[in-house]
Image: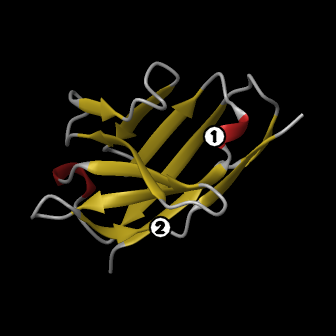
Amino acid sequence: QVRLVESGGGLVQPGGSLRLSCAASGFTFSTYWMHWVRQAPGKGLEWLSVIDTDGDTKYYADSIQGRFTISRDNAGNTLYLEMHSLKSEDAALYYCAKSSVGGGMDYWGKGTLLTVSS
């Protein structure tokens, strides 16, 4: 049974930093690309980033390019999102998602909430 559990969210001041984690289980983590996606209050889903199986290839949405870094620990079955220079518009529920064989995302966690406020 695939399970993705995000953690690390919380309240951060503008300009602050935080690292999100996603613990994966129930599948061979090291063989799948992994994504981060977020949903701000009252808005739709926004894809943020994807990382390949060994962490060499990473893609980012323009909105977070240069501020966020995706990484993974295949030995520990964990996905990370390092976030810096946080803005109020980064406040959202952050999800990790497993890539499907067809190229989309087939399993999601329940999310971890980031609040950015002074």
Q: Mark 2 Cα within 10 Å, few/some/many (few <14, many 20+)?
A: some
* Quadrant of the drawing holding the C terminus: top right
What residue do we see at 11% from left, 64% from top?
101
Provide residue 54's location: percent of width, then percent of height.
21, 36
* Quadrant of the drawing holding the N terminus: bottom left
Provide residue 29's location: percent of width, then percent of height.
27, 56
Provide residue 13's location: percent of width, then percent of height.
82, 31
* Callout 1 amino acid: Asp
Badge 1 marks a residue whose secondary structure is helix
Residue 62 located left or right of residue 114: left
Task: Find the residue positioned furthest to the left.
Answer: 102
Residue indicated by mark 2? 109
Q: Quadrant of residue 41?
A: bottom right
Residue 21 located left or right of residue 29: right
Viewer-closest of 42 and 31: 42
Task: Find the residue positioned furthest to the top.
Answer: 66
Badge 2 marks a residue whose secondary structure is loop
**Spatial distance from mark 2 to mark 1, Cα to Cα?**
19 Å
Question: Height in image: 84 above or below 55?
Answer: above
Residue indicated by mark 1? 90
Colouring rule applied to residues: secondary structure
Question: Height in image: 62 above or below 74?
Answer: above
Whether pointer 2 and pointer 1 mark residues with C-beta atoms closer than 8 Å, the reply is: no
What residue do we see at 49% from left, 38% from top?
81
Provide residue 87's location: percent of width, then percent of height.
69, 31
Q: Quadrant of residue 117?
A: top right
What residue do we see at 46% from left, 18% from top?
66
Sequence-first tag of 2 and 1: 1
* Callout 2 amino acid: Gly
